[in-house]
Image (tube, grey):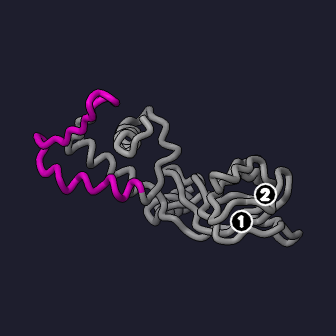
Amino acid sequence: NETPLGLAVQSVQASIDPKADRTWLDKPLLDRMSLFKNLLRSPEDQISILNQGSFEPLNLTQNEALHIVELQQQTPKPRRVMVSGQIDVLASKAQRIELLANGQRVKVLLETAPTEWRIGEQITVSGIGHYRADGTLLRIDADKVREARTSDRAFRHVARAETQRQQLDRQRREKNQ
């Protein structure tokens, strides 16, 4: 359901179900949801959320709350990014565009409606990049958008992000090869 409570329940359910679509869960949302662990102090504790049958009841256990914390710790922190690509989707009222950068779709949220841009134009966006737990870019909260320049070619590649732990693990694996 599209009520605030329904969306919150969907978020928690997605974070505890390994088969669920988690592509929209970002670090700030997981940071908030990880606070449930403070309320569940023993394995017998449980949080139940229901709303007169408008969505399936949620019963959150300590083990599930700890799973949310684990997912939150695996998710890289937001960081400044710059991406250059072609506008593929333009949603003026939603203040959102989608770019194609080397075949990868990048969602961009804008501070104002994108009235000066058109589908097919090459632009460069900079702002705060939010990541999924697997390190792929979820979206950019843009603070600057400009026409792409020839020198922006390096920003057509959308880099993955890693947590410090993921970086250390990768470096160990590379060293042992």
Residue at the image point whose x is 16% and y is 49% from the top: 40
Residue 152 among those drawn in magenta: no
Foreground of the two, 162 or 37 = 37
Q: Is residue 129 above or below residue 99?
A: below
Residue 38 among those drawn in magenta: yes
Q: Is residue 72 above or below residue 79?
A: above
Where is the C terminus found, in terms of image quarters?
Answer: bottom right
Residue at the image point whose x is 27% and y is 57% from the top: 35
User: Do residues under tags 1 and 2 come within 8 Å of each other at their CB atoms?
Assistant: yes
Give the magenta-colored segment's residue range. Answer: 29-57
Q: Is residue 134 above or below residue 57?
A: below
Q: Is residue 95 above or below residue 80?
A: above
Distance (Cα) linking label 1 and label 2? 8 Å
Would you name the residue on which mark 1 appears? 125
**Secondary structure of the residue carrying numbered label 1:** strand
How many numbered marks are there? 2
Foreground of the two, 88 or 151 = 88
Whole-percent x, y for residue 42 in the image: 11, 47
Q: Callout 1, which amino acid?
A: Val
Give residue 5's quadrant in the image: top left
Q: Judge from the rendering whether residue 120 lies leftward or rightward of residue 52; answer left or right.
A: right
Residue at the image point whose x is 26% and y is 47% from the top: 65
Whole-percent x, y for residue 142 in the image: 64, 66
Q: Callout 2, which amino acid?
A: Gly
Crowdedness near tag 1: few (<14), some (14–19) or many (≥20) residues, C-alpha within 10 Å:
many
Give residue 144's quadrant in the image: bottom right
Crowdedness near tag 2: few (<14), some (14–19) or many (≥20) residues, C-alpha within 10 Å:
many
Where is the N terminus found, in terms of image quarters?
Answer: top left
Whole-percent x, y for residue 46 in the image: 16, 41
In the drawing, what numbered circle is on residue 18? none
Would you name the residue on which mark 2 appears? 85
